[in-house]
Image (cartoon, grey):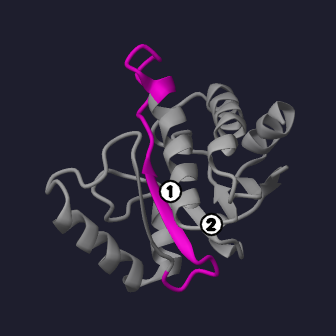
Amino acid sequence: MPTLETILSDITTLTVDAIVNAANSSLMGGGGVDGAIHAAAGSELLNECIKIAHSRRPNEPCSTGDAVITGAGKLPAKYVIHTVGPVWRGGTKGEPELLASCYRKSLLLAQENGIESIAFPNISTGVYGYPKEKAAEIAVNTVRHTLNEAPCVNKVIFVCFDHENFSLYKSKM
């Protein structure tokens, strides 16, 4: 049975097989966790993202709800799984399904790549405005349900950067 845990930490410092990046669709870095991951990983990560961008759709290399994988550059993790969460628009534009897809596709990529431990940030709850409690419920429920399809994954960590998310995730576990 895989272990699920919630921690209050900086995702860029974790020694796990993969960390998940709450990326934007260009994969070129941005603010929040995306910017922190790119800054800590160094130019190697950006170069891999550029290659992915050139090999896929030029204006949107990773669409909302999708995920891609790269190496981790200078990070202690081995891989970075980049997923693009939805911008909150009231919940009637498919946001719950798209957010669930981020977690599901990230776990399926982990399975495909033999990843045993994975750390997720609080996808879409920063500048994308997703309500934190709704996002925590979707994250925990989706991960629990998807782990059946990802038997390779034996450890999932929800990494919270703030106390509010940490409390919410702990209550959902």
Q: Residue at x 59, y 27 (%)?
A: 131
Query: Which disc, if any, is residue 115?
Result: 2
Residue 126 appearing in the image: no
Highlighted magenta segment, given as a residue range? 73-97
Q: Residue at x 36, y 52 (%)?
A: 24
Q: Is residue 150 left or right of residue 163?
A: left
Q: Secondary structure at mark 1?
A: helix
Q: Magenta region, mostly helix, strand or loop?
A: loop
Give residue 12's position: percent from left, percent from top. Answer: 62, 71
Identify the mark nearer the N-term, 1 or 2. Answer: 1
Within 10 Å of the Cα at label 2, are there few (<14), some (14-19), or many (20+) other Cα atoms? many
Instruction: Single out the residue that lies furthest toward the left.
Output: 58
Residue 13 in magenta stretch: no
Q: Which residue is mark 1?
A: 109
Up the image or down, 26 lies above or below 101; here it is: below
Q: Residue at x 66, y 61 (%)?
A: 118
Give residue 21's position: percent from left, percent from top. Answer: 51, 58
Q: Quadrant of the C terminus?
A: top right
Residue 167 position by quadrant: top right
Q: Secondary structure at mark 2?
A: loop
Residue type at mark 1? Leu
Q: CA distance from mark 1 to mark 2?
A: 8 Å
